[in-house]
């Protein structure tokens, strides 16, 4: 198996099941033009997030890590007319691009983009009584994943869903000797999910245009 083959399969899936989408394509183009890193979820992964939110019947979504708003658009499209999505972005430059992309997609009325360190903003959300959220998507700096999970649990309810991206790290998550902060943070996240009685969780490996990685999926049970 090669990256070329993974790209070809992702292309087949996207052409067949996702299709052309001017708003999403414009969001990626604008992100590229602004020099944002090309680390947004793949189109088929974005649609998976949209489907999960729809299956959940989500009316309120929390996203940790906005980047250019590509995944934000996928998630916000799953909301009903009175739904809301709060997305947190550390970099002001990224947030400005995201706001433009979200507005172009016609979703500005549903999405609240907040700028600053996510752990600080999460505390503000809690103080403001922003929860509980029906779905939380975590796709931010990996060393802070344990803190993001802690806040996700505070800001959700039984029945809420928590999704965390990039948890396989090219397979390095299975290496207990790896000292990369992103791997250490992800392993701590996995251990928390395994031992917290409020969660039923799993992790899934993926390959595709974004390489070898995967995601965690957890249901808040109590």
Image: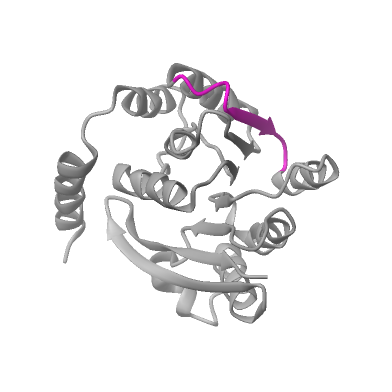
Q: x, y (%) of residue 41?
A: 39, 45
Q: Nearer the viewer, residue 53 or 14?
A: 53
Instruction: Give the total number of marks visible in the rendering.
Output: 0
87 sits left or right of 5 in the view: right
Q: Which residues are magenta?
A: 106-117
Q: Nearer the viewer, residue 204 or 4?
A: 204
Quadrant assignment, res 23 = top left
**Is 104 in the magenta?**
no
Q: Is residue 115 above or below residue 191?
A: above
**At x 21% / y 50%, what residue is drawn?**
10
Quadrant assignment, res 180 = bottom right
Q: Is residue 174 above or below residue 71?
A: below
**At x 53% / y 66%, what residue is drawn?**
218
Q: Residue furthest right?
A: 127
Q: Is residue 52 above or below residue 72?
A: below
**Is 109 in the magenta?**
yes
Please identify the quadrant where the C terminus is shown: bottom right
**At x 55% / y 82%, what residue is drawn?**
177
**At x 29% / y 47%, what residue is drawn?**
44
Q: Nearer the viewer, residue 94 or 136?
A: 136
Tell me, what colour scheme is on the image? one colour
Q: x, y (%) of residue 175?
A: 48, 80
Q: Is residue 64 above or below residue 217?
A: above
Q: x, y (%) of residue 156?
A: 68, 55
Q: x, y (%) of residue 1?
A: 16, 66
56 sits left or right of 25 in the view: right
């Amino acid at each position: 198996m090669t990256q070329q083959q993974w790209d070809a399969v992702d292309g087949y899936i996207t052409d067949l099941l996702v299709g052309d989408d001017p708003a999403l394509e414009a969001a990626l183009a604008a992100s590229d033009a602004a020099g944002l890193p090309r680390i947004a979820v793949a189109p088929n992964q974005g649609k998976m997030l949209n489907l999960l939110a729809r299956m959940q019947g989500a009316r309120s979504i929390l996203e940790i890590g906005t980047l250019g708003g590509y995944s934000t658009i996928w998630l916000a499209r799953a909301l009903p007319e009175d739904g809301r999505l709060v997305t947190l972005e550390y970099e002001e430059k990224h947030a400005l691009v995201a706001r433009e992309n979200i507005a172009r997609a016609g979703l500005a009325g549903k999405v609240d983009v907040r700028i600053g360190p996510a752990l600080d903003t999460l505390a503000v959300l809690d103080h403001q009584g922003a929860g509980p959220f029906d779905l939380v998507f975590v796709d931010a700096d990996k060393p802070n994943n344990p803190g993001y999970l802690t806040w996700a649990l505070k800001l959700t309810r039984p029945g809420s869903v928590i999704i965390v991206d990039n948890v396989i790290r090219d397979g390095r998550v299975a290496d207990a000797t790896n000292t990369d902060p992103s791997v250490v943070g992800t392993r701590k996240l996995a251990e928390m999910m395994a031992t917290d009685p409020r969660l039923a969780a799993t992790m899934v490996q993926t390959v595709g245009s974004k390489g070898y990685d995967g995601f965690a999926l957890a249901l808040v049970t109590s």
